[in-house]
Image: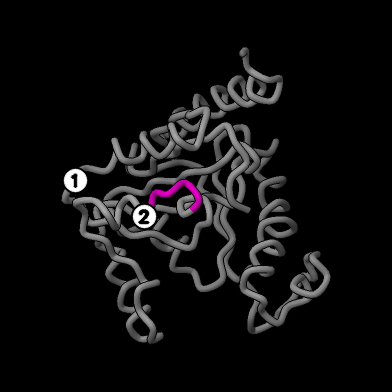
Amino acid sequence: MGQTPRELMNEKRGSNVVKNLEARNFEAYYCATGEEALKKALELIPEGASVSWGGSMTIRDLGLTKALHEGNYRVIDRDVYDSAEDKRKACLEAFGADFYLTSANGISEDGQLVNVDGNGNRIAALIYGPEHVLVIAGMNKVVKTAEDALVRARTIAAPMNQQRFLGKTPCTVTGMCGDCKSPDCICNQILTTRNCKPAGRIKVILVGEDLGY
């Protein structure tokens, strides 16, 4: 059976985004399926490496966190701890990890990553600290411009994530961004990663499926 129109579009569009990411010094790959993306991620992370991650439904849905826990890796996982103090220590330890895993809230067609964060640990590690950062994102995260990526992060990703967290914010109630200043707001830090420095530190796997929020 041949590829569907959506699969063909994702492949062509994804290949173009990969080229634009590479032009910005990211190391980038396109995988047609989540299964292929999981395989590629495990190829990129050598056994014995220390690995941590930020909040991401994408990497969990792919089975990557499970595979790392079951494999020969030194996993730094804040979710195994109960106390806020232990979770914070794990987040700080993650800055020294060999690999840090996350997704993106939006990716522009010209190869820029846009992320919005609540506490800031995820985008802080993306900027500096871990030796390598691996970003895995479905093609549903790809939009035309960096401005569109920010709109996507604020009006789609954040309200959808709040349905998990159920924080006391307008978007929890309405499903729409209220541009709030709530203590439970998860749109406190906004980051656009225009280029990767040093070159190749951030590796991006685009997946030809809808993944995460």
Q: Is residue 110 above or below residue 119?
A: above
Secondary element at tag 2: helix
Q: Residue at x 58, y 45 (%)?
A: 211
64 inside magenta stretch: yes
Secondary element at tag 1: loop
Q: Is residue 133 above or below residue 108?
A: below
Magenta: main secondary structure equals helix
- What residue does disc 1 label? 47
Where is residue 18 shown, x and y percent of the image?
50, 28
Displayed quadrant of residue 177: bottom right
- Please provide the residue range marked out in magenta: 61-65
199 inside magenta stretch: no
As rendered, which of 37 and 53 lies closer to the eye? Answer: 37
Where is residue 85 shown, x and y percent of the image?
35, 86
- What residue does disc 2 label? 66
As rendered, which of 60 and 44 lies closer to the eye? Answer: 60
Q: Viewed as shown, does residue 18 lie left or right of 90?
A: right
